[in-house]
């Protein structure tokens, strides 16, 4: 009984520390948003610039379909669904996990040492360091593209399908944040983040906006089982669009895809903790 009571107290204390950490994260976010809204005209212009830039990318896809009409059996509205889901997820990850993208500079300058002195979760502190509202431009453009795609194609809307779409977008953001976390973790040993990591973050969103069928077999396997980019939009979209699941995958795999994205983030955070334990400071 005494052991059980002690275990319960430890669990309650751990839950309290986690809740306190998320409360602090919210304080960081509010402070960052207030700072960015000091110059609203500048914010609106930069956000509009991001919107126009990403819209130009979709115009390139539209030009491709205007020339070839379909891509491995996928129509423009179907690919637009993939595109929009990928960009919504990526914009959320950039806004909420931007601190990991700029983390190499903290290691180089020795600023991470100050983070370690605070009795709070290091990952939450880094994530909240820089919440970027400018990603609203990409987010808005992605939402509009998804809305147009779903308006154009026939989707059998049921509650599970609506839930699958929402959860897939949110779990896709978790996947991209996981990639940012892994990129930041490399800085514990390299100081500078490796450029190859950007092929999985910024290059990953380019990969995810097209159907998996257009890629080579080994490439499809890599982005399904190693870096599961296909799980953030491709597999869920198969169920939403009523398309068959590729051979070798069970019919329920699209419903498992969001869980795989979340598991990837948890794995990345585990690697992050390993890096934190082996961090020896810069000596600056």
Image: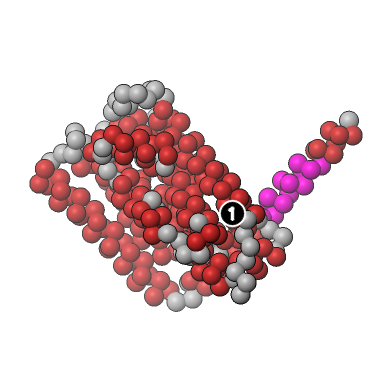
Residue 215 sits in which quadrant?
A: top left
Query: Residue at coordinates 32% horizontally, 55% vertically from top-left?
Result: 141
From the viewer's side, name the closer residue of 15 and 206: 206
Observer able to see residue 100: no
Query: Who's the residue at 62% across and 66% down the image?
Result: 281
Q: Taking the image as drawn, is residue 18 in sight? A: yes
Image position of 107 with respect to 6: above or below: below
Is 17 covered by the magenta stretch?
yes
Q: Helix, strand or loop at disc 1?
A: helix
Please say whether residue 249 is one of the residues in the magenta stretch.
Answer: no
Q: Which residue is mark 1?
A: 275
Q: In screen coordinates, is 29 left or right of 244? A: right
**Residue 181, horizontal then vertical, whole percent:** 51, 53
Image position of 83 with respect to 73: above or below: below
The secondary structure that dominates the magenta segment is: helix
Magenta residues, as a range? 9-23
Q: Quadrant of the C terminus?
A: bottom right
């Amino acid at each position: 009984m005494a052991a059980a009571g002690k275990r319960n107290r430890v669990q309650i204390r751990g839950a309290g520390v986690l809740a306190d950490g998320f409360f602090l994260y919210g304080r960081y976010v509010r402070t960052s948003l207030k700072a960015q809204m000091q110059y609203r005209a500048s914010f609106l212009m930069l956000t509009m610039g991001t919107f126009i830039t990403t819209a130009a990318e979709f115009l390139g896809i539209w030009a491709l379909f205007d020339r070839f009409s379909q891509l491995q059996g996928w129509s423009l509205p179907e690919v637009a669904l993939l595109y929009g889901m990928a960009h919504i997820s990526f914009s959320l990850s950039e806004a909420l996990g931007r601190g990991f993208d700029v983390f190499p500079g903290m290691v180089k300058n020795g600023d991470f040492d100050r983070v370690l002195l605070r009795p709070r979760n290091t990952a939450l502190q880094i994530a909240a360091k820089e919440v970027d509202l400018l990603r609203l431009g990409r987010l808005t453009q992605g939402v509009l593209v998804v809305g147009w795609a779903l308006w154009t194609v026939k989707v059998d809307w049921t509650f599970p399908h609506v839930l699958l779409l929402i959860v897939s977008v949110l779990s896709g953001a978790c996947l991209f944040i996981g990639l940012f976390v892994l990129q930041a973790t490399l800085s514990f040993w390299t100081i500078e983040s490796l450029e190859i990591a950007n092929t999985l973050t910024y290059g990953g969103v380019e990969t995810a906006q097209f159907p998996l069928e257009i890629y080579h077999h080994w490439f499809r396997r890599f982005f399904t089982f190693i870096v599961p980019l296909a799980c953030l939009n491709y597999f869920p979209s198969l169920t939403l669009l009523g398309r068959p699941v590729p051979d070798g995958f069970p019919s329920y795999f699209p419903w498992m895809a969001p869980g795989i994205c979340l598991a990837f983030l948890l794995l990345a955070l585990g690697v992050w903790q390993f890096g934190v334990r082996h961090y020896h400071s810069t000596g600056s």
